[in-house]
Amino acid sequence: MACGALWMLSAWVAPALALEITDDRGTRVAFTQTPQRIVSLLPSLTETVCALDRCNLLVGVDRYSNFPQSVLSLPQLGGGMDPNVEGIVMLKPDVVLAAPNSRASERLRALGIPVLVFETKTHADVRRILEKLGQLLEVPDAQRVWRAIDAGVSAAAQSLPASVKKVRVYFEVNRGPFAAGESSFIGETLSRLGVKNIVPTRMGPFPRLNPEYVVLANPDLIMVGERNHAGMEGRPGWSHIRAIKDHRVCVFAVADSDLIVRPGPRMAQAARVMASCLANQRP
């Protein structure tokens, strides 16, 4: 009896088994309890935390995180290329969420602050990161967020006429030009909407193109954000592109552009914005 009581007492006082999360750099980070103070250095990760109903745990974000509105009141800690490491340390976070190109990761780890690095290029990545953050933050059924995204993208596709399947689309994510290829999360959404991307999977998710490539591909429709549209028609040879000659260029306002280029919980809304463009501008 005494031995049994002693065993039960030792089990009661033993610390909880650590949860271990492996990030996209292969780094394994152990947590003995659910993080209560989170710094996010990427807008899509900020939005993911909030979509999991854990916005209240955020204590700081990068300068580009602007959704939901509640995060605008949080301390802004620079961007991926110029993080405010001192500001992050002062907030005493239990974990920092960052992109692979963030310059803060190694310095923060050296200071004893746990960092999880996530890279999101595809729909599968979005689903996987939802699952990992759901485990970390003890969110039951984190995949409900993915199911809502998936259903929303399907609904956007179903709203379009069959004629969009003939449309050849070029999506420019940044000047350079950098494109959203078929294998990117934007490209995957376009594929589900039924259109043909002029940048095939073999070229990678977000390749930098020779501008002449777009001229030769001659897309029927161009999608581009307002910040990157200026001067597009004036590029050598681009005035001969069918989409530009026929004025079939969807220029997304800043808010819609932010929505579309962030791989996270608002991808269904992004699909609706792109579907609206297709419905209004298809040949």
Image: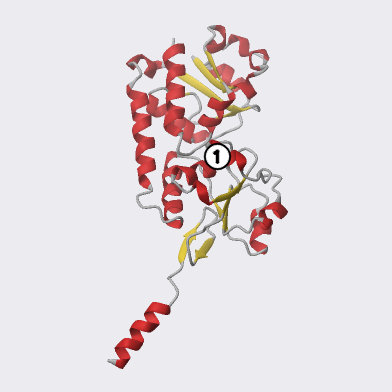
> Where 251 falls versus 261 (above or below)?
above
- The colour scheme of the drawn protein is secondary structure
> Where 73 falls versus 12 (above or below)?
above
> Where 251 falls versus 265 (above or below)?
above
**Which image quarter is the N terminus in?**
bottom left
Q: Please state which of residues 107 and 38 is positioned toward the viewer in this rendering.
A: 38
- Furthest-left residue in view? 1
Q: How many numbered marks appear? A: 1
What residue sits 51% from the left and 49% below the top? 56
> Where 247 falls versus 211 (above or below)?
above
Q: Which amino acid does label 1 sit on?
A: Ser
**In-image side of 60 versus 23 (left or right):** right
- Quarter occupied by residue 210: top right
Q: What crowding class fits label 1: few (fewer than 14 Cα within 10 Å), some (14-19), or many (20 or more)?
A: few
Q: Give coordinates of residue 213: x percent, y percent.
A: 58, 22
- Quarter occupied by residue 138: bottom left
Q: Give coordinates of residue 31: x percent, y percent.
A: 50, 64
Q: Please state which of residues 277 and 197 is positioned toward the viewer in this rendering.
A: 277
**Which image quarter is the C terminus in?**
top left
**In-image side of 163 versus 39 (left or right):** left
What residue sits 48% from the left and 44% below the top? 50
Q: Give coordinates of residue 249: x percent, y percent.
A: 54, 14
What residue sits 39% from the left and 25% below the top? 193
- Furthest-bottom residue in view? 2
Q: Give coordinates of residue 143: x percent, y percent.
A: 36, 46
Q: What element carries label 1?
A: helix
Task: Identify residue for label 1.
Answer: 70
What residue sits 64% from the left and 13% below the top? 233
